[in-house]
Image (cartoon, rainbow, N blue to C red):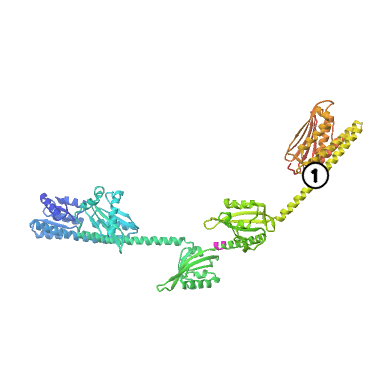
């Protein structure tokens, strides 16, 4: 639609001109009654042409023309007047008027001529404007540095050509349309509701590959929401294609009520969209290429090695090497390319060069990939192992023109591989030479499907079969007769995967039952680690078990013999005690009877020890609590009258156990100390209490006999005493490597303290 600014100082004539041009010729008009009003409208609203009366007060048509040309030199200007003066027409044409139309002719002729002149002038104006916009767009696009800038310039050019207020450029992303850029003064265009209406229209335009021009009536009939909410009264949807490929769609819209789209206008719009499509398509291609290049550079930069392109000559001349060359060799890429400082061939160990050249030549000749491992020497004279993988580059005729590939530093991997091989060989040697038998079973988790897959030489000797005869046998097939403990242990390791050991496990073979120490361990295997390998290590201890059984049998015999010895010693001592008692019955001297009684007590103390040893589970140890209680009971029996007035109290640590070498001295000492207390601590018929205790601490034993009698004389000295009992006590204490302590305040206390000498008790 062409918008005309009508300028005339006669209101009736101005209204007539406006109605005729709008109703008959389809123009849109703006009216101004003076030149000043016309200038204000021209500066604030877009118009396509100006029709002005010549004769007007204050500012006539020529003066207005001059003002307009100062602002815009190309806007169509038509002078419309009743005057017939050639000088006015010439002056108007000289100052830039496009046409001069006289009002004196018939109205239908005048307005037809006027409409025709307007159409010609506006079409010419729009054509020139369109060409200028396209030229400016071409210049602007050359300076655009990104897709965003190109889209900005293109959207502005579309608005300039169309004269409409808004535009949205949508780009095809796979099957979606994405709004790449837009210009909209209302701010409503990007709303979700508006876009949900616009998108189906644009998809339809792309499918049909035809532009869609709609006025208010068309939009209201199909999408009234755009008019009511978006204030879009006219719009144009044109698909963008380039080289037969659809790249998107342009949506141009306006809040002005367009009546018709002239063919020339449609042509201008189509031309600018074609240009825009090309620029956007090229920019998209550039962006994709730049992205691809950046991705390729990043990929090359992050590859674990040096990427190259080169020739097959002996120098291995390189056309290109990546930045990883510096890390690999110590030289920058420019030093290696075209052999500027060093050729790649010079890095390769002389011993490997001929082999490498031959292998690459043969592989490229067969159009096959090659894979090489060799040594290089770096700038700082260090040796590295590298892995090279590559392929040939054919020319247009299919002949080899060069090679390309990647070279990676595998020095660490090579060292690790060598170490792994070394450890593997060591383990294999240890596995085959280890003295214990080793069986390896593979299992799916059930004992019935646990199959022998490998074994060592020691296992072959144990099973007395060759390896080939045993591989493939199940666990249950190999061990048909064995202790139930082995069957249970193997089943449990399949469930909980925990290692376990068995000792003295019996397995029955055709030659008889044999005994083994067995260790079971497992590890998951396979890609999904659903299977197990069970390591079965077993050591034949049959000879040791038989020897132990023989030793145990011999020890039992010796223990029985030793018990018999103790029994006979005890019997002999009891016989001696009986003889002494019979002898005392024939002696009437009280002192002699007392001496014989003391001897009998000493004999009893030794006999009791042998009796306890005979009845003990451990023939070498005596529980001191039981022994002292026996001695006290014996005293009570021998001194029946005395025990009625003198109370014997025993307090012994029940955990104390002594051997016979120290138990006999302790018994003799106790015998002497208790006898002395009974005989000398109290006056005749006097009551009292004798306390016998035997305790221990971490390093020593304390044996104590205490009475509450009259005590020792003040001048008593055990070292000067001529008493046989005291002398015996001192000697026995020395035999125990102990010391004797005597205290006599309220009664008398005898303490014998002797070391444990490494015993635990």
The region drawn magenta spans: 412-416
Image quadrant in which you'd find residue 522 = bottom right
Residue 332 in the magenta stretch? The answer is no
Quadrant where the image shows the N terminus: bottom left
Where does residue 743 sit, x and y in percent of width and height? 80, 32
Residue 754 is situated, as x and y percent measured from the top left of the image, at: 78, 39
Occupied quadrant, residue 437: bottom right
SS class, disc 1: helix
- Using residue 230 as the reference point, say whether residue 664 is left or right of it: right
Name the residue carrying label 1. 563
At 20% from the left and 60% from the top, the residue drawn is 264
The answer to whether residue 296 shows anywhere in this view is: yes
Query: How busy is the neighbourhood of tag 1: few (under 14 within 10 Å), some, or many (20 plus)?
Result: many
Horizontal side of 334 relative to 737 (left or right) equals left
Residue at the location (47% across, 61% down)? 303
Q: Residue 475: x and y, percent?
A: 61, 56
Q: Nearer the viewer, residue 434 or 421?
A: 434
For the question of whether residue 103 can be seen, the reply is no
Chief secondary structure of the magenta portion: helix
> How many dots with numbers?
1
Drawn side of residue 486 relative to residue 112, left or right: right
């Amino acid at each position: 639609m062409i918008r005309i600014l009508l300028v005339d100082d006669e209101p009736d004539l101005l209204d007539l001109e406006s109605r005729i041009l709008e109703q008959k010729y389809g123009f849109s008009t703006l009216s101004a009654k003076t030149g000043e009003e016309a200038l204000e409208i021209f500066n604030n609203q877009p118009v396509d042409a100006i029709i002005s009366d010549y004769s007007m007060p204050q500012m006539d048509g020529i003066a207005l023309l001059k003002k307009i040309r100062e602002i815009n030199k190309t806007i169509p200007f038509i002078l419309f007047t009743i005057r017939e003066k050639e000088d006015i027409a010439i002056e108007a044409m000289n100052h830039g008027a496009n046409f001069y139309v006289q009002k004196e002719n018939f109205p239908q002729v005048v307005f037809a001529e006027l409409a025709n002149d307007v159409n010609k002038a506006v079409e010419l104006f729009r054509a020139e404007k369109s060409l200028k916009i396209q030229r400016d767009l071409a210049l602007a696009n050359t300076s655009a540095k990104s897709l965003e800038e190109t889209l900005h310039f293109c959207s502005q050019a579309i608005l300039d050509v169309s004269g409409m207020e808004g535009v949205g450029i949508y780009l095809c992303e796979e099957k979606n349309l994405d709004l790449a850029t837009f210009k909209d003064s209302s701010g409503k265009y990007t709303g979700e509701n508006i876009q949900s209406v616009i998108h189906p229209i644009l998809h339809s335009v792309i499918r049909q590959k035809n532009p869609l021009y709609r006025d208010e009536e068309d939009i209201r009939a199909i999408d009234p929401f755009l008019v009511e909410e978006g204030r879009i009264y006219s719009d144009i949807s044109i698909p963008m294609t380039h080289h037969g490929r659809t790249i998107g769609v342009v949506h141009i819209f306006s809040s002005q009520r367009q009546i018709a789209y002239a063919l020339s206008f449609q042509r201008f719009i189509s031309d600018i969209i074609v240009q825009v499509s090309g620029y956007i398509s090229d920019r998209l291609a550039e962006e994709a290429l730049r992205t691809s290049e950046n991705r390729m550079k990043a990929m090359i930069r992050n590859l674990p090695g040096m990427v190259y392109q080169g020739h097959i000559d002996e120098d291995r001349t390189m056309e290109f090497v990546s930045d990883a060359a510096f890390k690999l060799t110590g030289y920058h890429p420019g030093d290696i390319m075209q052999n500027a400082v060093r050729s790649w061939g010079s890095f390769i160990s002389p011993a490997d060069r001929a082999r490498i050249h031959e292998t690459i030549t043969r592989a490229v000749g067969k159009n096959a990939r090659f894979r090489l491992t060799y040594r290089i020497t770096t700038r700082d004279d260090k040796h590295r192992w590298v892995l090279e993988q590559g392929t040939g580059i054919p020319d247009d005729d299919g002949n080899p023109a060069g090679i390309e590939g990647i070279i990676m530093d595998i020095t660490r991997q090579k060292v690790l591989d060598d170490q792994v091989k070394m450890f593997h060989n060591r383990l294999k040697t240890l596995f085959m030479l280890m003295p214990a038998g080793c069986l390896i079973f593979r299992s799916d988790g059930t004992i019935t499907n646990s199959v022998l897959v490998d074994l060592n030489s020691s296992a072959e000797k144990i099973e007395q079969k060759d390896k080939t005869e045993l591989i493939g046998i199940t666990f249950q097939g190999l061990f048909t007769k064995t202790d139930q403990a082995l069957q249970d242990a193997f089943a449990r390791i399949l469930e909980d995967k925990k290692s376990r050991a068995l000792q003295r496990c019996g397995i029955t073979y055709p030659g008889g039952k044999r005994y083994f120490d067995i260790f079971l361990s497992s590890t998951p295997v396979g890609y999904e680690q659903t299977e197990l390998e069970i390591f079965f290590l077993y050591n034949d201890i049959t000879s040791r078990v038989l020897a132990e059984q023989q030793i145990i049998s011999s020890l039992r015999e010796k223990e029985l013999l030793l018990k018999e010895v103790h029994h006979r010693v005890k019997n002999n001592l009891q016989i001696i005690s009986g003889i002494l008692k019979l002898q005392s019955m024939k002696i009437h001297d009280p002192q002699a009877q007392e001496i014989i009684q003391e001897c009998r007590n000493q004999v009893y103390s030794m006999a009791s020890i042998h009796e306890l040893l005979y009845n003990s589970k451990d023939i070498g140890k005596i529980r001191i609590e039981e022994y002292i209680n026996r001695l006290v009971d014996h005293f009570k029996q021998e001194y029946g009258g005395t025990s009625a007035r003198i109370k014997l109290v025993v307090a012994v640590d029940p955990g104390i156990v002594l051997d016979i070498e120290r138990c006999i001295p302790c018994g003799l000492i106790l015998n002497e100390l208790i006898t002395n207390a009974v005989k000398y601590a109290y006056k005749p018929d006097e009551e009292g209490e004798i306390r016998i205790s035997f305790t221990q601490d971490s390093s020593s034993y304390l044996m104590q006999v205490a009475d509450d009698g009259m005590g020792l004389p003040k001048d008593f000295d055990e070292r000067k005493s001529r008493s046989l009992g005291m002398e015996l006590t001192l000697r026995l204490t020395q035999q125990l490597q102990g010391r004797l302590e005597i205290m006599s305040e309220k009664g008398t206390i005898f303490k014998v303290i002797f070391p444990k000498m490494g015993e635990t008790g």
